[in-house]
Image (cartoon, helix red, strand yellow):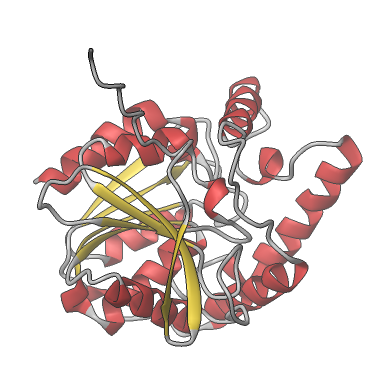
Amino acid sequence: MNAPQKSKVTWKNVPTATITAGGVQFAYRELGTDNPGTPVVFLAHLAAVLDNWDPRVVDGFAAKHRVVTFDNRGVGASTGKPAASMEEMAKDAITFIKAMGLERVDLFGFSMGGMIAQEIVLMEPQLVRKMIITGTGPAGGEGISTVARVTYIDMIRGWLTRQDPKQFLFFTRTPVGIRAGKEFLERLKERSENRDKEVTVAVLQAQLKALRRWGAKKPADLSKVHHPVLVANGDSDRMVPSKNTRNLAQRLPKSELIIYPDSGHGAVFQFHASFVPRALSFLSR
């Protein structure tokens, strides 16, 4: 008699685990291959918990790599008080990475996660091999300090139209963008069991404060970041104006730039079918 087939672990069913470090119980999920290559640590966006990652992107990376995602301090199912600066979030991420026994990692940071990635690589360059940063910008970047205003406006738009604010924040208002947003939001619902805790108002307020601080911060010297970096965004990002993405690519010595057409902040989710292979190719080189 044949043994029952073991179900494949995907983002839809991977269990949530916890690890305690630095006085925080971090909630995390990991999946992917057992190959000895460099693990990829995902760093999430503003007001995001584990369930805000696009399953197509996570499973796409996990086909070739060990993928580790986590809730930062005070976010989702992780304990503690939420951090109110990118520096604090980066330190927490470093604490988590080291607690997981990871000596060297690749970072994939989306939006605020891309800002945290920049802080990590400046704080502990030896911990990072490569970075993929999308929908993000540098410290002191144009328009970053006003993310809170854009966020609140689109939260109100979402409430008035009974839609998820991410439809406005992440995607363009063209027919293509609207369709891409609806498809993305449906994918986020694919995991129906053992979902993460919802983000709280306290988390949103702390993270918006961190973004204001990041936008007002003196620009960092990114010329000393000699790690390979893949930088991506849409051509019409409302949250972090797309010119910041181009600015990052110019200032990072070993960068590659992708700008997707008719797309906004969530371009890598809209174009996941082309972004994931490009990202995997970048990591494999």
Residue situated in front as seen by the camera: 34 or 50: 34
199 above or below 64?
Answer: below
Q: Is residue 260 visible?
A: no
Q: Residue furthest front?
A: 1
Please state if 102 lies on the left or on the right of 5 as rendered: left
Quadrant occupied by the N terminus:
top left
Q: Position of residue 132 (x, y in %)?
A: 31, 54
Q: Residue furthest right?
A: 160
83 above or below 36?
Answer: below
Please state if 75 lies on the left or on the right of 117 as rendered: right
162 above or below 240?
Answer: above
Q: Position of residue 281 (x, y in %)?
A: 17, 38
Displayed quadrant of residue 126: bottom left
Please state if 204 lies on the left or on the right of 16 as rendered: right
Q: Position of residue 25 (x, y in %)?
A: 50, 75
Residue located 76% across and 67% down the image: 201
